[in-house]
Amino acid sequence: MQVPAQFVCLSDGPSETITVAGQQLAFKHARPKDLVADDPGVSMVTQALRHLQHDGLENAIQHLGKRLPLAVCKRLVKRTERTSAWLHEAACQVMAVRRNRHD
């Protein structure tokens, strides 16, 4: 049995779930300092890290560090400087994995 996917987006507005064309969209409230909206690639990475914060974060850090381009890792570190301390630390760990990668 397959479970339909639910899209979850971070927003500085209230948390709510809406249905559009039969697809559920969940908007979760986030503090403005936790939003990195000016860079869609970095925003997707930060949302993934937040989602895996309590279960699977270390694996995500390893996976992202091995696959993200260096430029994205640099932007990730820079754009998380003013976010939650744990998120910036995770970004720095992604960068460390990336730098240790043997291309």
Image (cartoon, rainbow, N blue to C red):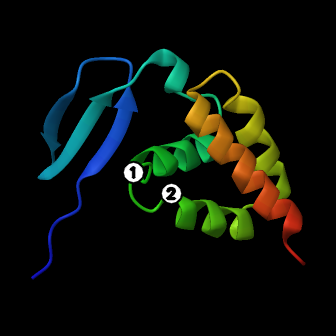
Foreground residue among 25 and 52: 52
Quadrant of the image containing the N terminus: bottom left
Q: Quadrant of the C terminus?
A: bottom right
Q: Which residue is mark 1?
A: 54
> Residue flagged by tag 2: what amino acid is it?
Leu
Residue 71 seen in the figure: yes
Q: Count the marks.
A: 2
- Between 67 and 25, the one lying in front of the other is 67
Q: Residue at x 48, y 17 (%)?
A: 32
69 to the left or right of 82: right
Q: Amino acid at mark 1?
A: His
Task: Report helix, strand or loop for mark 1.
Answer: loop
Nearer to the camera, 48 or 4: 48
From what the image shows, is residue 39 above or below residue 54? above
| Residue at x-position 80% and y-position 62% | 98
* Res 57 label: 2
Which residue is depicted at the point 51% across and 49% down?
A: 49
Evaluate if marks 2 and 1 touch, with contact meaning CB atoms under 8 Å apart: yes
Question: How far across and down, in percent of the image, does residue 86 sit?
Answer: 57, 36
Percent x, y for residue 39?
Answer: 65, 36
Q: Residues within 10 Å of mark 2 (few under 14, many from 20)?
A: some
Quarter where residue 8 is shown: top left
